[in-house]
Image (tube, rainbow, N blue to C red):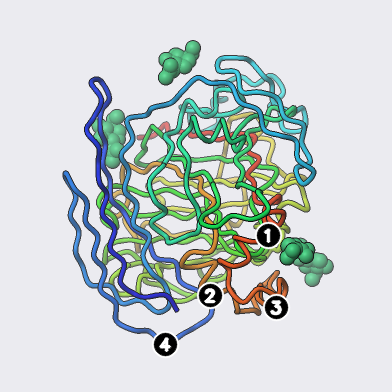
Amino acid sequence: MRPSLYIALCLLSAPSSEATLISRTASRIHHAATKRSARLAKDIRSAFSNVLIDQPIVGPDTGNRVYCVANPADAQNNTATIPADSGNPVIVSSIVSGSSLRRPTATSTSGGSPSPTPTSPWTLVETREGASFFDGWDFWSLADPTNGDVTFLDMQDAQSNGLIGVNSAGNVIMKVETTAKVSGNRKSIRIQSKNNYTGGLVIMDAVHMPAGCGTWPAFWSNGPNWPAGGEIDIIEGVNDYTNNQATLHTNPGCGLASSDSKTLSISGTLVSGTDCSVTSTSNQGCGVRSNSNSTYGAGFNSIGGGVYAMQWDTSGIAVFFFPRSSIPADIQAQAPQPSTWGLAMARWPAIDCDPFKFFYQHVAIFDTTLCGDWAGGVWSSSGLPGQAQSCAALTGYATCQDFVQNNGSAFQEAYWEVVSYKRYQSNST
Ligand SMILES: *[C@@H]1O[C@H](CO)[C@@H](O)[C@H](O)[C@H]1NC(C)=O
Ligand SMILES: *[C@@H]1O[C@H](CO)[C@@H](O)[C@H](O)[C@H]1NC(C)=O
Ligand SMILES: *[C@@H]1O[C@H](CO)[C@@H](O)[C@H](O)[C@H]1NC(C)=O
Ligand SMILES: *[C@@H]1O[C@H](CO)[C@@H](O)[C@H](O)[C@H]1NC(C)=O
């Protein structure tokens, strides 16, 4: 396995005259699904300016994700096109800031009124979609703290490399470089929302997500001073997995009352323990895996994706998934009523995990890394849904990195196609 000591230094450049320089350090551990003997690891996270965290971590077979952001939001208003390469089943138009591309009818909200009906306990406060999607996000362009074989591009480079754009359906595309062979890293994208939130209902509609051996995509959020501000992984997995895993990572004191799905009233299955604490769980957190093989990767893509909802309020935190064929009407009408949605895939009730003590000021994040601590770590493992054979066996490459460097065409499926990101606030707070 990878060395268990990672040190990340986030060197923050001098702020430009008007830009606010934000530095943030957070980290996360992703455990391999397969059980391995735990070994002690020391975790050192440090960042110049205002964050210094140094705490011992017990880690099995994973390293840390250390996230350091220096983002004076140097967004550019350049236009860009995404080449319609053979592996990408979309026709792509250029990004034009401020244009008014409509959503495809299949996912439109029939009228699209932003006002909730009186029956929804939630009010829409942020919508990111189409041509103006990227206005709401900062691009991470530092090294990948999760040790992936990627170079994250800033917005301008992402556009000039054709890795981001809007397709003819009006959906947002975020791709990975598919150059046949690279000697170092592949280019990829990682973005985080400019707005942060404490509590809320995040509803993300995607028709496609990165899939395949070597990939490790995620849609997630975290707060400041990790793990103090907490981490909520909404969509995450690696390689050929087809079943999504949602996970919380927190300071000590957050957990679940049971490991039984019936008792928890969830449709998913607890991956390991009930304790969400980073320090006392070998940094695994408390993860729940979906029992559906259309919730992640190729399985998700095969049904045209769907909608993920993350509900964070006084009742706790919950994650729902709705396949495209059964997106609730109240979501489509932008008047969500989670109480009518039935069983959540994952739920962490407030009684055993105070949702406003262990979680605050979250930024939403999309990223696609390659290999790294998790996808690389389980390259030779098999057995989880979608991964009947290991990626080593499937690809004939002994290491994830070798595959990533030598087979660019394998990453034509490694793209996000996002219809919309919407965030609601509770009317009762
Ligand atoms: C981009 O364009 C929008 C809309 O015209 C404008 O409000 C914004 O300030 C521009 N951003 C930059 C970085 O020029
Ligand atoms: C969250 O947003 C508020 C308001 O813009 C800001 O003051 C605060 O610093 C932000 N927190 C983080 C962790 O970015
Ligand atoms: C999901 O599981 C069903 C039933 O086992 C199987 O027929 C189908 O091929 C699986 N789909 C994927 C994407 O693995
Ligand atoms: C590249 O990867 C794809 C998908 O795994 C595979 O079908 C193809 O044979 C690989 N090509 C090379 C040259 O390894």
Tag in front: 2 or 3 = 3
Tag in front: 3 or 4 = 3
Q: Secondary structure at mark 4?
A: loop
Q: Secondary structure at mark 2?
A: loop
Left or right: 249, with 189 as reference point = left
Q: Secondary structure at mark 3?
A: helix
**Which numbered disc covers residue 393?**
3
The residue labelled by disc 2 is 33
In depth, the one of 184 and 144 nearer the eye is 184
Name the amino acid, label 1: Asn
> Which quadrant is the C terminus positioned in?
top left
Left or right: 145, with 18 as reference point = right
**Which numbered disc covers residue 60?**
none
The residue labelled by disc 4 is 37
**Which numbered disc covers residue 407?**
1
- Quadrant housing residue 16: top left
Disc 4: CA contacts within 10 A as few (<14), some (14-19) or many (>=20): few
Q: Position of residue 315 (x, y in %)?
A: 41, 51
Q: Position of residue 390 (x, y in %)?
A: 66, 76
